[in-house]
Image (cartoon, rainbow, N blue to C red):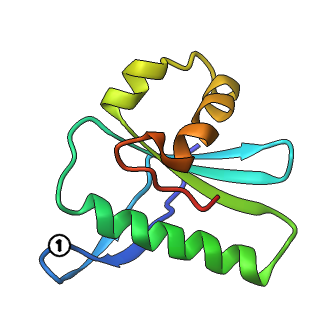
């Protein structure tokens, strides 16, 4: 199913751009995780992740029915940890989110 979820953000050139995350994963424990993957990083990754963090924090502040979170995974880290399912991904990457990734972005 296609979802047209996008966020406006200020790109590296200072212009307003649209950011379309790679995946949105709805989990049974009332969590929605937005997953951004990158094979090659570019200058717009930091402002995109900052905007996504702000969006998740804002949503979590105004409602408590669902917890919104996100994770950024670069190709190097994905190859290192090689998750074979989202459950494995979800179990492996929370520890990585706390600082072991080269670019550890997450709402948690």
| In-image side of 45 versus 93 (left or right) | left
Residue ranking furthest to the left: 13
Q: Position of residue 22 (x, y in %)?
A: 44, 46
* Label 1: few (<14), some (14–19) or many (≥20) C-alpha neighbours in 10 Å: some
**Residue at 51% of width from left, 63% of height from top?**
5
**14 is higher (above) or lower (below) than 98:** below
Q: Position of residue 96 (x, y in %)?
A: 53, 39
Is residue 35 visible in the rendered structure shown here? no
Quadrant in which the N terminus is drawn: top right
Q: Position of residue 71 (x, y in %)?
A: 52, 49
Query: How many numbered discs sit on the rendered protein?
Result: 1
**Residue at 48% of width from left, 17% of height from top?**
82
Is residue 53 visible in the rendered structure shown here? yes
Front in this rendered view, residue 60 or 20: 60
**57 is higher (above) or lower (below) than 38:** below
Quadrant in which the C terminus is drawn: bottom right
Residue highlighted by disc 1: 12
Q: Secondary structure at mark 1?
A: loop
**66 is higher (above) or lower (below) than 61:** above
| In-image side of 70 versus 13 (left or right) | right
| In-image side of 26 versus 41 (left or right) | right
Quarter location, residue 70: bottom right
Q: Position of residue 95 (x, y in %)?
A: 61, 39
Quarter location, residue 6: bottom left
């Amino acid at each position: 199913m296609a979802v047209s979820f996008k966020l406006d953000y200020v790109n590296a050139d200072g212009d307003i751009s649209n950011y379309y995350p790679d995946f949105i994963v709805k989990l049974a424990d009332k969590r929605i995780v937005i997953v951004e993957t990158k094979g090659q990083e570019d200058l717009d990754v930091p402002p995109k992740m900052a905007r996504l963090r702000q969006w998740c924090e804002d949503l979590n502040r105004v409602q408590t029915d669902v917890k919104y979170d996100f994770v950024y995974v670069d190709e190097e880290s994905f190859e290192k940890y090689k998750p074979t399912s989202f459950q494995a991904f979800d179990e492996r990457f929370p520890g990585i989110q706390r600082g072991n990734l080269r670019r550890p972005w997450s709402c948690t």
